[in-house]
Amino acid sequence: MAVYTVLTAGNEPFTPATVDHARTWAGSYGLAPGHVLTEEATRIIPQHLLIGPDGRTFYRHVGFLAADEMLRILDDFRHYRRVPDVRSLPDP
């Protein structure tokens, strides 16, 4: 499993995230610099995605998720208590 962070805004509301923001974020949280990405947007609502090895999105949540909730969701997928809704998956 690989975890990525996507910054969708800069330090001020409605400003775009930059490569410098990504590097600072990675350093502040001990993340691999290549796993902190920026998106050309100014969205400030967090989004969580679980993307399968084939690139399909298995799970999407818009809004805050606590660490224990994230771990529960991952565990549910790992043990097949939760599966992706195939109607929402794009063609590979």
Image (spheres, rainbow, N blue to C red):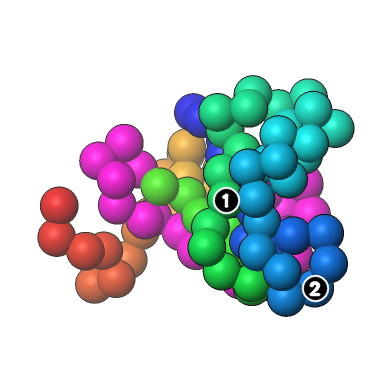
Q: Circle 2 sits on which residue?
A: 13
Camera-side residue: 17 or 84?
17
Q: Decide if residue 75 is in sight here.
A: no
> Label for residue 82?
none
Q: Dot 2, crowdedness within 10 Å: few (<14), some or many (≥20)? A: few
Q: Is residue 64 left or right of residue 89?
A: right
Residue 62 drawn at (x, y percent): 61, 71
- Looking at the rendered structure, the kind of residue marked 1 is Thr
Which segment is the magenta one?
Answer: 52-72
Camera-side residue: 50 or 23?
23
Residue 46 image-quadrant placement? bottom right
Q: Decide if residue 37 is in sight here.
A: yes
Q: Circle 1 sits on which residue?
A: 38
Q: Dot 1, crowdedness within 10 Å: few (<14), some or many (≥20)? A: some
Residue 36 drawn at (x, y percent): 61, 38
What secondary structure is marked by label 1? strand
Disc 1 and disc 2: Cα gap in Å? 15 Å
> Could you tell me which residue is drawn at 79 percent across and 28 percent down?
27
> Could you tell me which residue is drawn at 55 percent across and 28 percent down?
34
> Could you tell me which residue is drawn at 21 percent across and 64 percent down?
90
Residue 21 image-quadrant placement? top right
